């Protein structure tokens, strides 16, 4: 083989090696990209799995349900002009071991309280109701029985709720919509004065 032929052959080999190197580089890059994407997907799955475990897995829900405070026959008076809220709250508290009474407005709550004050442990009342509002109900209850424990619920954000609560003598405040967990923990906290 002549030198020119050898040089030609070397150029072809070099070109093939270059093409091969480029192809190998592309293959390696593609694999690296796939590995990174796979790692990202695994991180995402891991994040989603931990999020599901924290927020909604069956095991976690069962664990949280077990940890939710339950009643021991304490009586809760629920006052709300919205029947759906009143009935849902009553059903939940009853299911969790509390005795429940319900009133659809402030005047009905006052009538129930007059009849059964000795057995009522906590009052959970809406703040905004027609005729007798939650704040007026609280003021009247404070004059009737200064020691009654009261939780106010409202769908309206109040700017200075802690100060207002202190002046009214309220033990707890729930912003609507609240979760079952939040309600149960607040009732338990107020019952046992865990402030």
Image (cartoon, rainbow, N blue to C red):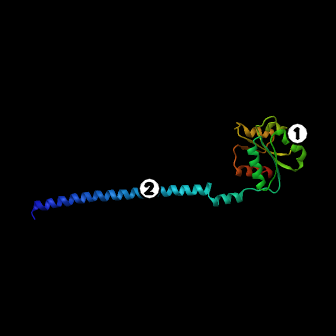
Cα separation, mark 1 vs mark 2, equals 67 Å
Foreground residue among 23 and 116: 116
The one of 27 and 180 positioned closer to us in this rendering: 180
Q: Which of these two is toward me, 62 or 5?
A: 62
Above or below 154: residue 14: below
- For label 1, the residue is 143
Q: In this view, does 36 lie to the left or right of 136?
A: left
Number of residue marks: 2
Near-viewer residue (75 or 159) = 75
Q: Residues within 10 Å of mark 1 (few under 14, many from 20)?
A: few
Give percent across and percent down for residue 132. 82, 36
Residue positioned 49% across, 58% down in the render? 42
Q: Which quarter of the picture shows residue 13?
A: bottom left
Query: Dividing the image into 4 quarters, which one contains the N terminus?
Result: bottom left
Q: How many C-alpha atoms fall within 10 Å of the one at disc 2: few (<14), some, or many (≥20)?
A: few
- Quarter occupied by residue 30: bottom left
User: Which residue does the image show at 87% across and 44% down from the upper left?
Assistant: 113
Residue 188: tell me if it is visible.
no
On the image, the x and y values in percent for residue 164 come to: 76, 38
Residue 154: assigned label: none
Look at the numbered disc 2 and give the secondary structure of its residue.
Answer: helix
Looking at the image, the residue that sits furthest to the left is 2
In the picture provided, is 8 more to the left or to the right than 87? Answer: left
Asked whether the beta carbons under mark 1 and mark 2 sit within 8 Å of each other, the answer is no
Q: In this view, does 14 lie above or below 86?
A: below
Dot in front, 1 or 2? 2
The answer to which of marks 1 and 2 sits earlier in the sequence is 2
**Residue named by callout 2:** 37
Residue 108 in sight = yes
Q: Residue at image x 85%, y 45%?
A: 148
**Callout 1 secondary element:** helix
Q: Where is residue 79 in the image (x, y as percent from the top left)?
A: 80, 43
């Amino acid at each position: 083989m002549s030198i020119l032929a050898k040089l030609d052959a070397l150029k072809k080999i070099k070109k093939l090696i270059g093409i091969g190197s480029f192809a190998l580089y592309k293959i390696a890059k593609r694999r690296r990209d796939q590995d990174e994407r796979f790692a990202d997907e695994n991180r995402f799955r891991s994040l989603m799995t931990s999020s599901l475990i924290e927020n909604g897995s069956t095991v976690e829900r069962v664990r949280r349900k077990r940890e939710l405070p339950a009643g021991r026959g304490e009586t809760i008076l629920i006052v709300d002009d919205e029947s759906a809220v009143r009935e849902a709250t009553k059903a939940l508290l009853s299911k969790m071991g509390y005795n429940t009474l319900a009133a659809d407005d402030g005047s009905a709550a006052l009538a129930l309280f007059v009849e059964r004050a000795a057995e009522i442990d906590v009052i959970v009342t809406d703040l905004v109701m027609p005729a007798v509002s939650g704040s007026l109900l609280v003021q009247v209850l404070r004059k009737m029985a200064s020691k009654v424990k009261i939780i106010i619920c409202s769908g309206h954000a109040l700017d200075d709720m802690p100060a207002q609560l202190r002046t009214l003598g309220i033990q707890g405040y729930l912003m609507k919509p609240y979760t079952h967990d939040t309600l149960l923990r607040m009732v338990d906290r107020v019952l046992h004065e865990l402030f």
